[in-house]
Image (cartoon, rainbow, N blue to C red):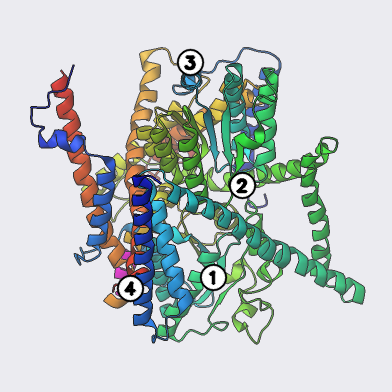
Amino acid sequence: MEPDRTRRRSPLEWFQALDRRIVYLLFFVFVVGAHFVPLYWPVTPAKHTRDLFNTVEALPLDKAVVVDSDWWLGIRAESEGQLRALFHHVMRRGLKLVIISWVWGPEAQKFAYDFAADVAKDYGYVYGKDWVELSAMNKVGGAELASFARDIHGFVKTDVFGTSLDDKEKLPMMANTRNIYDIGLVVSFSYGFDTNWIGFIQGVYGTPFGVATSAIESSTAYPFIEARQICGMMASAPGAAEYEQLLKLPANKRYARQPVNVLSLASVYVLFGILLSNLAYLRSLRKKR
Amino acid sequence: MEQASWALRAFIFVIVFFVLWKIHHARSGRELYLRKIPGLEKVDEAVGRSTEMGRPIMFNPGFIGLSVELFCCLACMQHVVRKAARVNTNVLVPVVDPLVYPITEEYWKDAYAMEGKAGLFSPADSIRYLPGGQSVYASSTSGWMERERVGANFLWGAYGWESLFLAEGGQRAGAIQIACIVSYHQVPFLIVSCDYTAFGEEFYAAGAYFGRDPVLLGSLIGQDYSKLLMLLMMIIGSILAILMATEFTPLYMILYGF
Amino acid sequence: MNDKKVIYLVVAAAVVAALIAGFLVQWSRVKGNPDEDLTKRFGAWAAAICVFAVFSYLYSENAFYRLFEHALLGFGLGMGTALTIQEVLIDKWWKPVTVAVKAFYAGTQTGQSYYDILLILAALFGLLLYFQYSKKYLWLSRITIGITVGMGAGLAIKGTAVTTLPQITSTFKMFFVSSELAPSLDVGGRALYMVESFLLLLVVCCVLYYFFFSFRRESAIAKAPANLGRFFLMISFGAFFGNTFMTRVVLLIERIQFLLHDWLMVQ
């Protein structure tokens, strides 16, 4: 039967027939425009973010904090805010910082160093004396973490510049950071956290383990938080914004604010789209009947 | 495991016992029941439809490394390839792991040989090695899917964000799509974009479902018994937690006196 | 040459000319800035072109996208090879082995040298994998595959046992909480805790039941927990969907921030 071209389509029918490419283009334009709309909604820190914050607050000063930089450049909008927030907290407290990275994540290694060096300027932190980035490790199903826990110097051997960890002149901090017992907290920054940290470090030695993940993996962390295997979590850019709120950082140091703002506005677009398309679909079902 | 408690050791021993017991049953030829899994029954329909359209099939193992999941995936791949071989249809397989590539090639060639169709298609043209991460895999596989205009797309393995990218590519190519994935946070996307979806434990069940290998079948059923044990432990544990809550609760009083 | 091809060529030439002009205008503005150099600017423009090339796939699969797709594949392969050689073979194998061999030769070996010399054996096992290409000696490659799979399985069992099994005990919840057990909670708080605990146990049990494959479910009573489990799974997938959407938008935000700040240099 030929479609009735003389009948005008309702707005919902027109919306349902919209080419998906126009939807993509509109979304792109909307997200670009959202960068210029400074609507900063108030942020209420979630319980898991406060738990991570309190764990760092309660750490004794003779223990180091290990930051596992295991993310990739695509989630920089989440990870940069998270990393900078934690670096601010660790350096403000005067804790020693050890950054570890992986062979298949050279950009995470580079950017973690850059962010730490940038934040270190605010607190007078000196590389080698107060913070160190170790050379990249290779993932071998968890065996690398077991070796790392037993003997950091023997397993990793050098820092990211190739300096031996036993060099007391260039890396004095590492003289007292030799194994897991010298570490007070491990925080993993990744797209999805590696459960081997729980299996080989937290579950075995009891070292507190925190995560800063992308939103997609934050849901999978809840069973571990419930079982107290993870002491706290920064979930995506909102988690970073919450952490910055807890630290009471000045506006120019809050890197997570803009991504969270854009994310909120983008969510409005998607919610609007989902509502309209569902209404259009229900109307078309009713018409068929 | 020097830090394991006696309870954990006993629990692992019980799980291993269940699995070995059921493998022994499967090997002894006993009939073992497996319920129907929706989604997996549509594999034949997908192969048939692709053949009718005269288009190849694509089987995506995703980001599976050398692990248990790989052998479940390959058992399913072999089942699909055998079905396709019977109707002279090509099966395209993109692979990301260099260790997985030769194993996949062996299973693929064996599947065609089992149906007497060895040499019908060239593995060099049908199995592609796509290293370099998710972005490369997603863009290359999507492009390949669209250029070959595949008739059926099997998303069978472990995926990250590229799952929807691949499903979109399959939709554009007009393929019927069946997903069976390990990573459950991609499931919502595949449910809305694929025709049929199986997830979680059903992935491991699929290996036993198609292959009927005694080891896979016995492992699956042994795991069912372990899950039943865990379920009972949770219920009993919760009841005991209430009964032992304080010194005023009846069980506490019975055990430790008034 | 037909009209359509002429139009495509003219449009392509115009786009290339616009890109070159844009680059030259921008470079002339930032030339004096000490934080900027030609390679950085060129890199930003090249990356921006790659971004638009990949985004063009959203319109349709085209030659421009295909060109960059193959370039990305080549880049990924090259980068992977370079990383494997530099970070793994040289840093993690060649350097420790040569240091250990020199130490043994000079008689100055330490405890670490004994471990590092064993890396030669590890390399031999790795080389056995190349026998995949030989029909006669294929069985040698299976030794390495067997070791890798066995090691992976052993590590996975240990990791899973310590990671996942303790979560069973975390599901032992108390349904009835008195004020003595939770003095910090008021009546409403205790009621909420009880509802949450009951819901947690119900959901875990129903979802576990859904994934039973070898027990028959023929009666309505046997099917009910499975249906409930599937219902709860769909709710959780909705939550995953929402979180996954957030991550996907963040990926887009990151690229747009690059285009605005690093490419167009918009503050």
Provide the secondary structure element on which disc 4 rests: loop
Task: Indicate the chain on which mark 3 is placed.
Answer: C
Viewer-side label of 3, 2 = 3
Give the CA distance from mark 1 to mark 3. 52 Å
Mark 3 vs 4: CB contact within 8 A: no
Q: Position of residue B256 (x, y in %)?
A: 48, 42
Residue interval drawn in magenta: A241-250
Q: Position of residue B110 (x, y in %)?
A: 70, 26
Provide the secondary structure element on which disc 2 rests: loop
Name the residue carrying label 1.
Answer: A99
Provide the secondary structure element on which disc 3 rests: loop
Name the residue carrying label 2.
Answer: B5
| Label 2: few (<14), some (14–19) or many (≥20) C-alpha neighbours in 10 Å | few
Viewer-side label of 4, 2 = 4
Q: Residue at x 39, y 19 (%)?
A: C223
Task: Indicate the chain on which mark 1 is placed.
Answer: A
Name the residue carrying label 4.
Answer: C265
Is residue C202 at least partly visible in the picture? no
| Label 4: few (<14), some (14–19) or many (≥20) C-alpha neighbours in 10 Å | few
Q: In the rendered structure, which amino acid carries the disc numbered 2?
A: Ser
Name the residue carrying label 3.
Answer: C216
Taking the view exactly as shown, the residue that stands out farthest to the left is: A7
Task: Indicate the chain on which mark 4 is placed.
Answer: C
Viewer-side label of 1, 3 = 1
